[in-house]
Amino acid sequence: MRTVVVLVEAAGDIENARDFYDTQDAGVGDYCTDSLLADIESLALYHGIHLRQYGFFRMLAHRFPFGIYYRDLETETQVFGILDLRRD
């Protein structure tokens, strides 16, 4: 199985998503975090099958409107950012 590494910037994006959804309703932020982490973990199996955008692969999150941007290296997959797709 392939190693998936979440870079510091992407970890900050996950925290920002959690904080935003926690202001909407209690507990939704944790659910969002769990959902995004499950999507990221799936990259261990499904890396490299997504469309390329801006030099990165982009996987769409399943339950929340986020794009997960990553690069495939020889030995690992690096997640660079998790961006809210409702923003410019």
Image (spheres, rainbow, N blue to C red):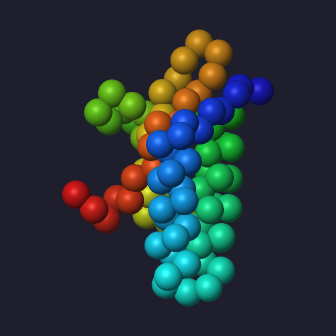
Residue reaching furthest to the left: 88
- Does any portion of residue 60 appear in the rendered image? no
Q: Residue at x 29, y 33 (%)?
A: 54
Q: Residue at x 62, y 85 (%)?
A: 26
Percent coordinates x, y for residue 19 in the rendering: 52, 70
Looking at the image, residue 84 sits to the left or right of residue 79; the answer is: left
Residue reaching furthest to the right: 1
How many numbered marks does the figure carry?
0
Given residues 72 and 16, the one toward you in this image is: 16
Q: Quadrant of the C terminus?
A: bottom left
Q: Quadrant of the N terminus?
A: top right
> Toward which corner of the image does residue 86 lie, by quadrant?
bottom left
Looking at the image, residue 86 sits to the left or right of residue 11; the answer is: left
Image position of 30 with respect to 57: above or below? below
> Toward which corner of the image does residue 14 lie, by quadrant?
bottom right
Residue reaching furthest to the top: 74
Percent coordinates x, y for residue 12 in the rendering: 50, 51
Looking at the image, residue 76 sits to the left or right of residue 62; the answer is: right
- Does any portion of residue 69 appear in the rendered image? yes
Q: Residue at x 53, y 40 (%)?
A: 8
> Toward which corner of the image does residue 62 lie, by quadrant?
bottom right
Image position of 36 with respect to 27: above or below? above
Q: Residue at x 50, y 82 (%)?
A: 23
Given residues 15 and 43, the one toward you in this image is: 15
Percent coordinates x, y for residue 60 in the rendering: 47, 51
Percent coordinates x, y for residue 33 in the rendering: 62, 62
Image position of 79 with respect to 82: above or below? above
